[in-house]
Amino acid sequence: MTNHDQAAELRKRLNRLAGRRAKTIAVVSGKGGVGKSNISLNFAIELTQNGKKVLIFDMDIGMGNIHVLTGQSAVYSIADFFEKGLSLEELVYKDSEGISYILGGSGLSQLIEWDESHLSRWLNDVEELQQQYDFLLFDMGAGATKEALNILMSVDDIIVVTTPEPTAITDAYSMMKYIYTHGGENAFYLLCNRADSEREGQEAAKRLQQAVHKFLGKESFELGVLPESTVVKKAVSAQTPFLTAYPNAKISKALQEAVRIYRQGQGESLNQSETASFISKLRHFFVKGRR
């Protein structure tokens, strides 16, 4: 074992002894085109700028674009976990912003076909990664497959991204209902993107909150409103996160405020030692789904 390997193993052991466990967040939307992946990336960057270590799992099956938004070249995806036997840690990319991420690729579609060996490796690898980061952020696909549902029901918190459009609100509600009616007990956090005004975004979030409360009997929490902004398109074209390229833009300030609200609210007040761990819940749902 090399000195580097010994140092890495020592860090893992110290993290285990310290009981370190990353908080898990899933970012979802009811439909595509609402800016979910862009928000996931910039949310993670703001957490990093606040001194947190963040790993993004790009779970947009077959259409992952986190690496495109950052201008990075992608060599490996989660498919290589299955096809080449690589560990999840070997699939981690690190960019200049200090963000780490794993691409979803097409491998997740094989989730339902996993044998016991695949499942055991996946859970062990994720558990190892949880001990190395403060946050694991899952950028989910626009839909909700049975495989993705297991992850959604296991994470600590779910950030639901919508826009003021009625169809986007309806689809966001359908996603929340789908998760809740399948047994998800997560906290829902709402983020309204591409609003023409603060008022429009707040009204959209309020309608969604009221529907969730009335029909599901569940509370949800508003993180804020992100305005429609031309700088987002410019940043995407330049393959640079808008928070980095335009830190003083209104959307950047709004995103920073959303992260602040999340961190100061229930997002970090959850006492994880008193809750079932992400891994134990994930194992439960996967095993249950295989029966």
Image (tube, rainbow, N blue to C red):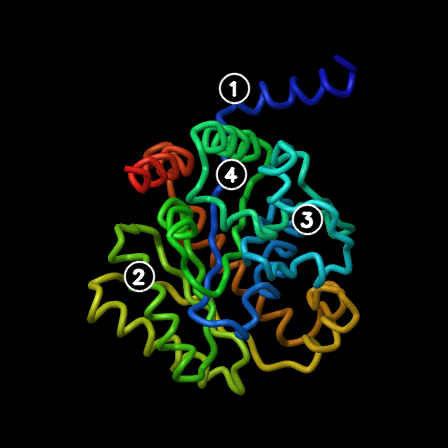
Residue 227: which disc?
Answer: none
On the image, the x and y values in percent for residue 63 come to 60, 61
Along the viewing direction, whichever of 122 and 187 lies nearer the viewer: 122
Q: Does the residue at mark 1 contact the one at mark 4 (Cβ under 8 Å)?
A: no
Residue 22 circle label: 4
> Which amino acid is tagged 1?
Leu
- Residue flagged by tag 4: what amino acid is it? Ala
The numbered mark at residue 17 is: 1
Query: Mark 3, mark 2: which one is toward the viewer?
Result: 2
N-terminal of the pair, mark 3 or mark 2, is 3
**Vertical comparison of 160 with 171: above or below:** above
Query: Disc 4 vs disc 2: Cβ atoms closer than 8 Å?
Result: no
Question: Which quarter of the rendering shows the C terminus?
Answer: top left
* 3D distance between C-alphas at marks 1 and 4: 14 Å
Give the Cα distance between marks 4 and 2. Answer: 25 Å
Q: Name the N-terminal-most of marks 3 and 1.
A: 1
Q: CA distance from mark 3 to mark 2?
A: 30 Å
The mark nearer the N terminus, 1 or 4, is: 1
In the image: residue 204, left or right of residue 22? left
Q: Nearer the viewer, mark 4 or mark 2?
A: 2
